[in-house]
Image (cartoon, grey):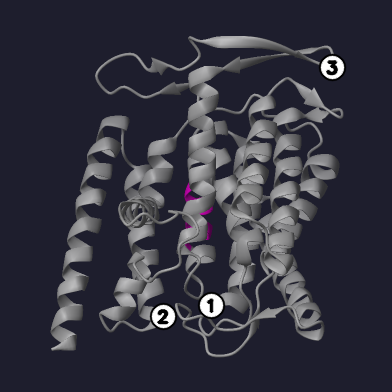
């Protein structure tokens, strides 16, 4: 089974599952009414993310258990299979189902955070983590210098203070970054698809077949969801989708050699925007994760007079451009490109704000 085939299978399955979830939600009244910050005008389902997760789980299970059972990322095993792949399945199911419950019934912020911590612990227990930081001026910075051995059910796990702490911040941050940009039709799914495709190409370049397979399956699942979610959206992914995509977008760079600079470049506008918005909320004394407002970059595009499709396609272009730069750059050049990206986002915000002021006058 080649990569193009599993991409197409994932895409088709995602389209079908999302359609089924949409009909199920409409039939049972599982819809949300438009809020002040929303752009849609009628109630729509908000549980489409579970279709993305299901498409990925089904196709990846078939691929790794039947088609390529000898594929592995590491030598360790859980339940008889590669423990890192199994940890992705387990944590993916937990975050998708946990946030699906939140989409339907609602969860307190601390409960959602507890679920996020749980999935990070599962990921870290499998050996996935941020072990070092690249240093363009010398040797990589080792993050495993301080660790504590823990015996769990006869198995020794090594809690690495700096590595596991930074892994927690990275993964929780990525989950919330994708959640932040899921405020306009097609943005979160499309940008995630671009990021997964870049990670797929990167994994092929360094001969990491299993990571390439996971990336392209996720890419297909996200693109399939776009059939229903691009403007005008007929269903939203909700937290079950944004948190699931964010988790996997955080995990894959860690598996493929800690290529965080690549992910930062692809998702840079979302990360920088999220940091700016979160910082502004903290300054105002608000919760940076749960405070609703219209200060995100996509809101600024809309306020400046851009249409929804123009806004989304513009942000797609930014993600794709810097993703292309990431593929062709060395570590030092990625750091330079990341600096340029931050400046570009800052200038873009200033320009959009100026256009908004002129429009009001």
In screen coordinates, is 96 left or right of 323?
Answer: right
Pointer 3 local density, CA inside 10 Å: few below 14, some 14–19, many at least 20: few
Q: Residues within 10 Å of mark 1 (few under 14, many from 20)?
A: many
**How far from the left and from the top, in percent, is residue 123?**
66, 33
Number of numbered callouts drawn: 3
Secondary structure type for disc 2: helix
Please report whichever mark, 2 or 3, sits nearer to the chain's N-terminal start. 3
Q: Residue furthest front?
A: 285
Range covered by the magenta-colored residues: 191-198
Q: For this rendering, which residue is in front, 284 or 305?
A: 284
Q: CA distance from mark 1 to mark 2?
A: 8 Å
Please, is residue 319 above or below residue 310 in the view?
Answer: above
Magenta-colored stretch includes residue 192: yes
Q: Which residue is mark 2?
A: 309
Q: Earlier in the sequence, mark 1 or mark 2?
A: 1
As displayed, is residue 356 above or below residue 208?
Answer: below
Q: Element at badge 1?
A: loop
Q: Secondary structure at mark 3?
A: loop
Which quadrant is home to the C terminus? bottom left
């Amino acid at each position: 089974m080649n990569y193009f085939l599993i991409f197409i299978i994932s895409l088709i399955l995602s389209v079908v599952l999302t359609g089924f979830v949409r009909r199920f939600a409409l039939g049972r009244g599982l819809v949300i009414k438009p809020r002040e910050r929303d752009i849609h005008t009628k109630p729509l389902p908000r549980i489409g993310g579970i279709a993305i997760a299901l498409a990925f789980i089904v196709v990846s299970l078939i691929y790794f258990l039947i088609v390529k059972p000898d594929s592995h990322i590491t030598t360790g095993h859980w339940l008889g299979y590669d423990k890192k792949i199994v940890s992705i399945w387990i944590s993916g199911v937990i975050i998708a189902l946990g946030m699906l419950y939140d989409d339907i019934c609602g969860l307190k912020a601390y409960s959602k955070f507890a679920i996020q911590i749980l999935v990070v612990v599962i990921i870290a227990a499998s050996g996935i983590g941020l072990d070092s930081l690249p240093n363009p001026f010398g040797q990589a910075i080792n993050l495993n210098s301080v660790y504590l051995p823990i015996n769990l059910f006869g198995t020794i796990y090594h809690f690495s203070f700096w590595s596991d702490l930074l892994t927690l911040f990275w993964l929780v941050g990525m989950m919330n970054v994708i959640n932040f940009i899921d405020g306009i039709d097609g943005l979160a799914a499309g940008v995630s698809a671009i990021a997964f495709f870049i990670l797929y190409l990167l994994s092929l370049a360094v001969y990491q077949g299993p990571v390439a397979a996971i990336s392209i399956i996720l890419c297909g699942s996200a693109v399939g969801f776009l059939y229903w979610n691009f403007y005008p959206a007929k269903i939203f992914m909700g937290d079950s989708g944004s948190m699931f995509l964010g988790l996997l977008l955080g995990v894959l760079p860690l598996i493929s050699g800690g290529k965080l600079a690549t992910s930062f470049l692809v998702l840079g506008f979302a990360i920088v925007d999220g940091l700016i918005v979160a910082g502004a909320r903290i300054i105002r004394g608000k919760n940076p994760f749960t405070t609703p407002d219209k200060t995100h970059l996509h809101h600024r595009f809309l306020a400046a007079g851009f249409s929804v499709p123009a806004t989304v396609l513009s942000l797609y272009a930014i993600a794709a451009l810097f993703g292309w730069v990431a593929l062709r750059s060395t570590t030092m050049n990625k750091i330079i490109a990341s600096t340029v990206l931050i400046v570009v986002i800052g200038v873009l915000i200033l320009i959009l704000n100026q256009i908004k002021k002129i429009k009001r006058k």
